[in-house]
Image (tube, rainbow, N blue to C red):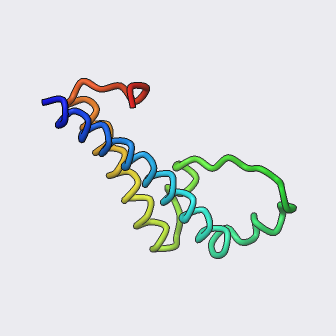
């Protein structure tokens, strides 16, 4: 049973890493498309913290699909944590 629990923890870590990678890719798509004007305001090295809510009303169909994917991924991650009485800090 311990192997099963470890495998579940590994799935959660993978989902978390995947979420971060998808968000990074989504930001890159946005900054080269719908948010290109915003990108032009920033200088090299400037920092801006995007949140998923920044993409909720995008017109770009690709960004809409990525937004939906991330929401589903987060929901799945939370459900797996809850089903297995895990805390994200335990991973």
Q: Where is residue 52 drawn, in percent x and y?
A: 52, 50
Outermost residue, front side: 3
In-front residue for pair 53/80: 80
Q: Quadrant of residue 38?
A: bottom right
**Numbered circles on residues, count:** 0
Taking the image as shown, residue 4 lies to the left or right of residue 51, namely left
Q: Is residue 44 above or below residue 8?
A: below
Outermost residue, right side: 43
Q: Is residue 81 above or below residue 36?
A: above
Q: Where is residue 53 drawn, in percent x and y?
A: 53, 48
Taking the image as shown, residue 30 lies to the left or right of residue 40, namely left
Q: Residue at x 24, y 24 (%)?
A: 85
Q: Residue at x 83, y 60 (%)?
A: 42
Taking the image as shown, residue 6 lies to the left or right of residue 18, namely left
Q: Residue at x 30, y 37 (%)?
A: 9
In-front residue for pair 8/20: 8
In-front residue for pair 6/51: 6
Q: Quadrant of the C terminus?
A: top left
Q: Is residue 21 above or below residue 53?
A: below
Q: Quadrant of the N terminus?
A: top left
Q: Quadrant of residue 61?
A: bottom left
Q: Where is residue 15 drawn, in percent x and y?
A: 37, 49
Q: Is residue 35 above or below residue 67?
A: below
Outermost residue, left side: 1
Q: Where is residue 48 drawn, in percent x and y?
A: 73, 50
């Amino acid at each position: 049973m311990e192997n099963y629990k470890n495998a579940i923890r590994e799935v959660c870590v993978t989902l978390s890493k995947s979420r971060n990678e998808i968000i990074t890719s989504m930001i890159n798509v946005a900054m080269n498309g719908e948010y290109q004007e915003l990108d032009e305001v920033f200088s090299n090295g400037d920092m801006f913290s995007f949140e998923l809510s920044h993409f909720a009303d995008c017109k770009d169909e690709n960004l809409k699909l990525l937004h939906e994917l991330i929401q589903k991924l987060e929901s799945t991650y939370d459900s797996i944590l809850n089903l297995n009485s895990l805390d994200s800090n335990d991973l």
